[in-house]
Amino acid sequence: MRGAPGESALASCAAIGLALALVASPAAAQTVAPSSMDAADLQCFGVFIYLGGQGSDPAAKAWFTGEALHYLGRLEGRSPAVNWLDRLTAYFAGPFPGEFEAQRERCGAEATARDTALEGWSTAFMARVEAARKAD
């Protein structure tokens, strides 16, 4: 995982989140607290969305985007009626800057473990495909 962005970038993120929260429609706001699983996935979604918006390396942006989509898919899969953009905006305006480092470490470890597992599955799958080709 790349190094954390500077504090000025986090402050800018918080300001953007606050501005978005101020213009968000009150009717769109959700008052139901997320489950602990949703909260953890929202934190990782936020971390990867944020990191994907930093820097200019296309490969890093693509990786961060893929990780963000993983967490968004989990969130929408469990709770499709929730407006996750509103929830993410509130998270950015609230605790995100203060807990960024801890969540970046946790989410990065989760992503690394998942990527390692996926590489193993891919290798095993390709071995099976190759064996099937040879059998034909």
Image: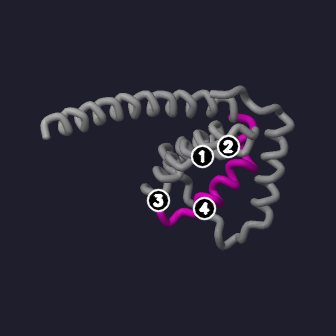
| Secondary element at tag 3 | loop
Three-letter code, disc 1 = Thr
Q: Which residue is mark 3?
A: 79
| Secondary element at tag 2 | helix
User: Dot 3, how many residues are within 10 Å of its Cα: few (below 14), some (14-19), or many (20+)?
Assistant: few
* Label 2 to label 1: alpha-carbon separation: 6 Å
Location of the N terminus (image quadrant): top right
Q: Are marks 4 and 2 in contact (CB under 8 Å)?
A: no
Residue shown at 79% from the left, 39% from the top: 10
> Which callout, 4 or 2, points at the residue further toward the start of the chain?
4
Q: Which residues are magenta?
A: 80-99
> Which callout, 3 or 4, points at the residue further toward the start of the chain?
4
* Label 4 to label 2: alpha-carbon separation: 28 Å
Reply yes or no: does residue 77 show up in magenta.
no
| Secondary element at tag 1 | helix
> Which callout, 1 or 4, points at the residue further toward the start of the chain?
4
Q: Which residue is mark 1?
A: 65
User: Dot 1, how many residues are within 10 Å of its Cα: few (below 14), some (14-19), or many (20+)?
Assistant: some
Foreground mark, 3 or 1? 1
Q: Which residue is mark 4?
A: 31
